[in-house]
Amino acid sequence: MRDVIRTLHPEKKQGVNISKQKYEMIRNAILCVLQEQKEMTFMNLSRAVEKEVNGTFDGSVTWYVTTVKLDLEARGKIKRVPNSRPQLVRLV
């Protein structure tokens, strides 16, 4: 069996099992982008991560960014900016 990780959700909803390798790739890209940009909209974050993984990722980058972003929120690594429209995210 391949290595998988069970993601967390900030609202205590059930997470999903995803490939640990894909999780790590997207997590590293999210954290790298946010270190450079400090704060950005979810849509821009998703686009920036897509550029980071540029053709080396098999699957829907947007779905994985959404899933890993929620996991990182639940783990206290990133947070949503309160009352932001569109949603802004930043490192904690």
Image (cartoon, helix red, strand yellow):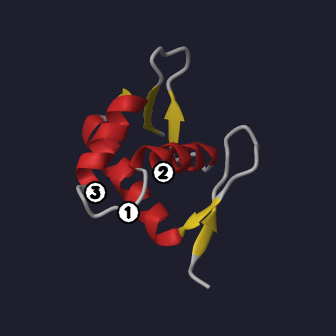
Q: Secondary structure under badge 2?
A: helix
Quarter containing the N terminus: bottom right
Distance from Cα at disc 3 to Cα at disc 2: 12 Å
Q: Mark 1 points at which residue?
A: 58
Of callouts 3 and 2, which one flags the residue occurring earlier in the amino acid sequence? 3
CA–CA distance in space, label 1 to label 2: 10 Å
- Using the numbered discs, state the Cα–Cα distance from disc 3 to disc 1 in whole angstroms: 10 Å
For marks 3 and 1, the one nearer the N-term is: 3
Residue that appears at 34% across and 61% down: 57
Where residue 49 appears, as percent x and y from the top left, is: 32, 47
Name the amino acid, label 3. Val
Q: Disc 2 marks which residue?
A: 64
Residue 76, percent across and down?
Answer: 58, 45
Front tag of 3 and 1: 1
Q: What residue type is labelled 2?
A: Tyr
Measured as percent of width and height from the top left, residue 42 is found at 42, 31
Name the residue beneath numbered marker 3: 53
The percent coordinates of residue 33 (x first, y second) are: 30, 45
Asked if the residues shown at circle 3 and circle 1 are in contact, with their CB atoms under 8 angstroms apart, the answer is no
Classify 36 as above or below 28: above
Q: In which quarter of the image is residue 53?
A: bottom left
Q: What element carries label 1?
A: loop
- The image shows residue 18, relative to residue 77, as above or below, that is below
Q: Which of marks 1 and 2 is nearer the N terminus?
A: 1
Q: Nearer the viewer, residue 11 or 79?
A: 11
Q: Quadrant of residue 7?
A: bottom right
